[in-house]
Amino acid sequence: MANIPSGTHHLVRVSKVKQPLWKKRTASLSRWLHIYLSMVSFVIVLFFAVTGLTLNHADWFDGKETVNKFTGTVPLKWVKVKDTAAIAKLEIVELLKHKHHIKGDVSDFIIDDGQCTISFKGPGYSADAFIDRDNGTYKFKESSLGLVALMNDLHKGRDTGKKWSYLIDIAAIFMTLLSLTGIIMICFMKKKRVNGFLLLGAGALICYLVYYFMVP
């Protein structure tokens, strides 16, 4: 073995163990998705978080109901017909929507011998029209429950239509991806991985214990 001359210094290079390419790409992709999904879905997540609170404590945010009542007439030929199938349903609905700026969609159109009853439903909103088939006159009642009721119904998807239902599905997918990408990210953080999974397990255990011991 050769002697190392005194006074000389040798640099010893310690090569780092390279991570497999798939690990680097997975960590990078999960980080990218987590950051940008968080930004894109920030308003959606915040909305469902806030409305979760307002739904759970509805008595804290009990809004004042606003009721409006109107009267009017529809063309008599639309309703005074022997065959109820000949009643001009579409024309009546369009006239009421145009005249009273109705916010909801038709939920019921009931026809009996002397009257037509049309109900409209929307988030935090309802309206009913009662049309006399003998003379074409009607009474219209509109009820609005305020902003909190509107937000709560949007959260539940009640009387919101298919388009809003699609948005709820998208929000659910975003929140699921946020959770999964967060878990994937913690898998690649050696110093925080153990504590992260311990907290994850603790959170799951707390939820289960609350359910098991406190939910009737």
Image: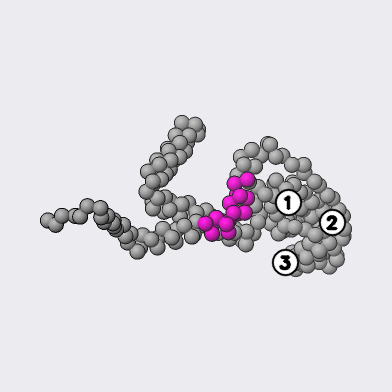
- How crowded pointer 3 is (Cα within 10 Å; few <14, some 14-19, many 20+) is rated as few
Query: Of helix, strand and loop, which one carries label 2?
Result: strand
Dot 1 surroundings within 10 Å: few (below 14), some, or many (20 or more)?
many
The label on residue 85 is 3
Q: Earlier in the sequence, mark 1 or mark 3?
A: 3
Amino acid marked by disc 3: Ala
How far separated are the C-alphas under marks 2 and 3?
20 Å
**Do labels 2 and 1 touch, CB within 8 Å?**
no
| Residue 39 on the magenta span | yes
Residue that label 2 marks: 138
Is 49 magenta? The answer is yes
Question: Where residue 191 sits in the image (x, y, percent)?
Answer: 38, 46
**Residue at which label 1 appears:** 125
Is 33 rendered above or below residue 49? below
* Pointers 2 and 3 in contact (C-beta within 8 Å): no
Q: From which residue to which does the magenta span run? A: 35-50
In this view, the mark in front (2 or 3): 2
Relative depth, front residue between 5 and 35: 5
Q: How many marks?
A: 3
Q: Is residue 195 above or below residue 135?
A: above
N-term-proximal mark, 2 vs 3: 3
**Which image quadrant is residue 117 in?**
bottom right
| Residue 38 appears in the figure | yes
The location of residue 145, given as percent across then percent down, is 74, 46
Residue that appears at 74% across and 51% down: 126
User: In which quadrant of the rendered view does residue 59 lie?
Assistant: top right
Identified by mark 1, the residue type is Tyr
Which three-letter amino acid code belongs to the residue tagged 2?
Tyr
User: Looking at the image, is mark 1 or mark 3 nearer the viewer?
Assistant: 1
**Badge 1 element:** strand
